[in-house]
């Protein structure tokens, strides 16, 4: 695609938008980049963009920026129905994203991975397996460095593994540009539906319903990753997930599966029971053992599903089982995902800040047999809390709430307690995450696990889940510093739910 001289707008200057604006400007496009935040919020980032030739419009999205523009590139943080995007639609201007442009430009085959949970762990696992198999491998998309920055360095015989969110995949559907009746030929490839050579859907459960109008819209966005496969392209699906099983009925072969609960003909599954069950990959003619469950170092049944998914994907790419085994028995996890950040006075502190939905919180609680002191809260995503509340009553000794969703979660616990015998965990209400860590240190006993698994987004107090996880790590570190942490429990806690 020749972007020389093409007038475009990039909406949103977070990591992806900034990388895309710089890339397009360096290749001769006339780029205007706009963000709702003022210039003071960006620091040195603006200098690099200005040097690249990007025109900046900060502190708002005036529709006048659309005059004479051929394309609007949208960052994932910008809602699909944002006023500025609706104004672009009214003018017939097409919409696309950094990830969609990268897929169009990339010379190497692409693996795309999506799901309501487990995306980052599975994407990282696949990347590590492919590297262990000897391929030059690039990992990105919704994690890490935006891949558009490396697209000119990626060779045709490399491997690319992308995590793709529902916000990115919305623009892989041609329906995202149903408003376009003409347009410049240079951009037409970005308006067609597109799916990767190997595409995987790990699971689909309620998520991001604060951004998607309905569950049906959310599923539709996810479906783009498998909907436009070319002949020979492989879809890898979760046999244990009701939505992906149903989706398979409308998809063309080849389909590969992974399952923790059942046998599969092509893909990855468990053979046997308990800790000595074998993880196997099954191809057209044989079955190969990767390792046993007891050899896997990641905690939790959900991570066992992630490992099976990674093996099924790697097998579809032709990776040897030896590379799968090497990674499966050594990989200990990704930052902010059930990450052990410290042990103090016999208490282990785990950072699961990535748990931005009640479902992810449930998976975290099921990963421990030790007594749990749970830290939960943040900004709610309009998701159901019933199952999480029931499990919190069963699995925790203390529940420490913080952030905007404090009372919402407390009320869910109260409803879940109705009709149950006495013995509910003590519920504490805190103002900040640091307060919550201090309360946890006060009530914890040797052998306990203190688990940050919020069940909510971080946007009420933090830039993202990673910043929240780092603040948790720092707060835990302070516990062992001289003087420690001794909060006024009478002020911080609110008694039983």
Image (cartoon, grey):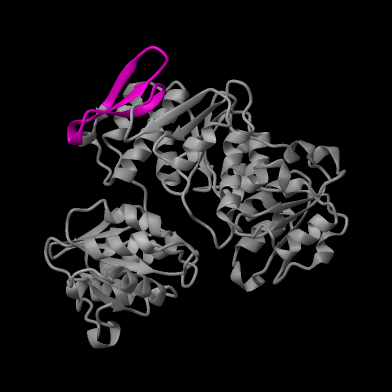
Which residue is drawn at the image coordinates 72% and 41% (left, top)? 174
Q: Name above or below for residue 322 compared with residue 239.
A: above
Residue 362 visible within the image: yes
Tell me which segment is drawn in magenta: 264-290
Q: Give the image location of residue 18, x and y in percent.
A: 64, 55
Which residue is drawn at the image coordinates 74% and 43% (left, top)? 27
Residue 26 visible within the image: no
Q: Name above or below for residue 219 compared with residue 379.
A: above
Is 143 placed left or right of 155 in the picture? left
Q: Give the image location of residue 173, x and y in percent.
A: 68, 42
**Towards the viewer: 334 or 211:** 211
**Towards the viewer: 40 or 370:** 370
Q: Name above or below for residue 369 compared with residue 288.
A: below
Give the position of the C terminus as an image quadrant: bottom left
Which quadrant holds residue 149? Answer: top right
Which residue is drawn at the image coordinates 68% and 47% (left, top)? 23
**Towards the viewer: 230 or 164:** 230
């Amino acid at each position: 695609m020749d972007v020389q001289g093409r007038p475009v707008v990039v909406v949103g200057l977070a990591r992806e938008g900034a990388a895309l604006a710089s890339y397009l400007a360096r290749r001769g496009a006339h780029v205007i980049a706009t963000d709702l935040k003022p210039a003071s919020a960006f620091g040195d980032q603006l200098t690099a963009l200005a040097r690249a030739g990007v025109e900046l419009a900060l502190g708002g999205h005036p529709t006048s920026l659309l005059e004479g523009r051929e394309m609007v590139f949208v960052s994932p943080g910008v809602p699909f129905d944002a006023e500025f995007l609706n104004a672009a639609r009214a003018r017939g201007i097409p919409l696309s994203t950094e990830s969609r442009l990268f897929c169009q430009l990339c010379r190497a085959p692409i693996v795309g991975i999506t799901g309501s949970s487990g995306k980052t762990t599975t994407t990282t696992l696949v990347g590590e397996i492919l590297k262990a198999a000897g391929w030059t491998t690039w990992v990105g998309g919704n994690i890490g460095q935006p891949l558009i920055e490396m697209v000119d360095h990626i060779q045709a015989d490399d491997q690319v593994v992308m995590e793709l969110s529902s916000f990115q995949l919305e623009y892989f559907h041609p329906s995202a540009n149903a408003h376009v009746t003409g347009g410049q030929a240079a951009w037409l490839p970005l308006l067609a539906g597109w799916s990767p050579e190997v595409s995987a859907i790990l699971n689909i459960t309620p998520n991001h319903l604060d951004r998607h109008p309905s569950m049906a819209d959310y599923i539709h966005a996810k479906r783009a990753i498998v909907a436009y496969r070319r002949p020979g392209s492989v879809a890898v699906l979760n046999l244990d997930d009701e939505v992906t099983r149903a989706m398979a009925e409308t998809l063309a072969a080849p389909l590969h599966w992974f399952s923790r609960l059942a046998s599969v003909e092509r893909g990855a599954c468990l053979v046997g029971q308990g800790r000595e069950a074998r993880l196997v990959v099954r191809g057209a003619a044989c079955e190969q053992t990767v390792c046993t469950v007891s050899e896997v170092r990641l905690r939790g049944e959900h991570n066992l599903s992630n490992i099976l998914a990674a093996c099924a994907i790697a097998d579809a790419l032709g990776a040897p089982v030896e590379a799968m085994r090497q990674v499966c028995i050594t990989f200990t996890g990704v930052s902010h995902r059930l990450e052990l950040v410290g042990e103090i006075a016999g208490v282990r502190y785990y950072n699961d800040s990535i748990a931005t939905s009640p479902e992810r919180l449930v998976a975290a609680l099921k990963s421990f047999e030790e007594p749990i002191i749970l830290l939960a809260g943040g900004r709610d995503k309009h998701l159901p809390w019933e199952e999480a509340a029931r499990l919190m009553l069963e699995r925790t000794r203390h529940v420490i709430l913080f952030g905007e969703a404090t009372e919402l979660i407390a009320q869910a616990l109260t409803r879940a307690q109705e009709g149950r015998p006495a013995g509910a965990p003590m519920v504490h209400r805190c103002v900040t995450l640091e307060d919550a860590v201090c309360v946890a240190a006060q009530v914890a006993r040797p052998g306990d696990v203190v688990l940050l698994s919020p069940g909510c987004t971080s946007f009420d107090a933090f830039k993202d889940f990673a910043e929240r996880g780092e603040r948790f790590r720092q707060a835990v570190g302070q516990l062992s510093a001289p003087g420690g942490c001794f909060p006024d429990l009478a002020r911080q806690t609110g008694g039983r739910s």
